[in-house]
Amino acid sequence: MPLEIIGAGYGRTATLSLCIALEKLGVLARSPDLDVGVWQRAFDNPETHEDEWEKVYGNYRAAIDWPTCEFYKGNGILQDERGLKCKLFNAPFFLELSERYPDAKVILTTRSAESWAESFTTTIQRALDYDADDLSPRRIEIRDLNRRLMLGGALEREPVKKYDNKYLCEVFNNRVEEVKRIIPADRLLVLEMGDGWEPLCQFLGKEVPDEPYPHTNAKEKFFEMYPCPSSDNLTTI
């Protein structure tokens, strides 16, 4: 089945809560349980890779979080309203999925850049830096893929800045503005953390459920879901 909803928001912007909310609205959502090979081929060969997206999304109506939020367009080159080509800030594949699924709506989950950077460095970045011997081959495979492609490859290009909150805020803010600039307004919902059911349900044409909007995967709970690395097992560059 074709995707109906594409999540453009980075992790740590309430993406898991959005997945749960969508499923409560009857929309089966995917938060990455991924075939690493598909993503590696798309990342390494953005212009020539085989279209394998239905292998990943064929049984889902919505896709949220990494790596989905990175895969939009093969070469990151777009034409503006004057027909001039422009290079996007941090997205070598910025609109691929939105072009592959042209009828899909796009949801950009977001929050303040400062709070996102603080949350990202104390959760996801720590997990990416975890190099202990107890990792399964599968987790190593997924970790290494995410090291390469997260934030449009910015962490791989600038590894010394991966705990630099000023740099991360710049990456985050540029990404948010790109999505808002490029996705047509009638196709895009910008969903701030804490907005709740109303804007989401209005955007999707759904009734507001008679229950609180989901709230899960807070920073304090992150390492209950993922093995918690000790500082001794973190790489710093």
Image: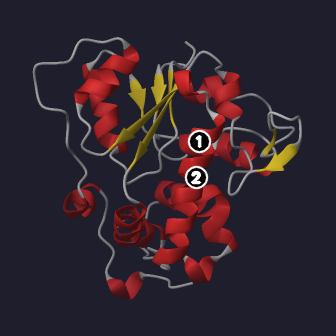
Residue 137 position in % (x across, y down): 51, 59
Rendered residue at 88%/35% (across/down):
83
Indicate whether 160 appears above or below 191. below
Rendered residue at 65%/44% (across/down):
39
Left or right: 114 as drawn, with respect to 201: right
Say which residue label 1 marks: 179
Residue 165 position in % (x across, y down): 46, 75
Q: Identify the image quadrant of the C terminus.
A: bottom right
Whole-number angstrom distance, CA of label 1 to CA of label 2: 6 Å
Q: Which residue sits furthest front?
A: 82
Q: Identify the image quadrant of the N terminus.
A: top right
Q: Residues within 10 Å of mark 2 (few under 14, many from 20)?
A: many
- Count of marks overlaid on the render: 2
Rendered residue at 34%/33% (across/down):
19
Q: Residues within 10 Å of mark 1 (few under 14, many from 20)?
A: some
Contact, mark 1 vs mark 2 (Cβ under 8 Å): yes
* Residue 141 seen by the camera: no
Q: Which mark is residue 227?
A: none
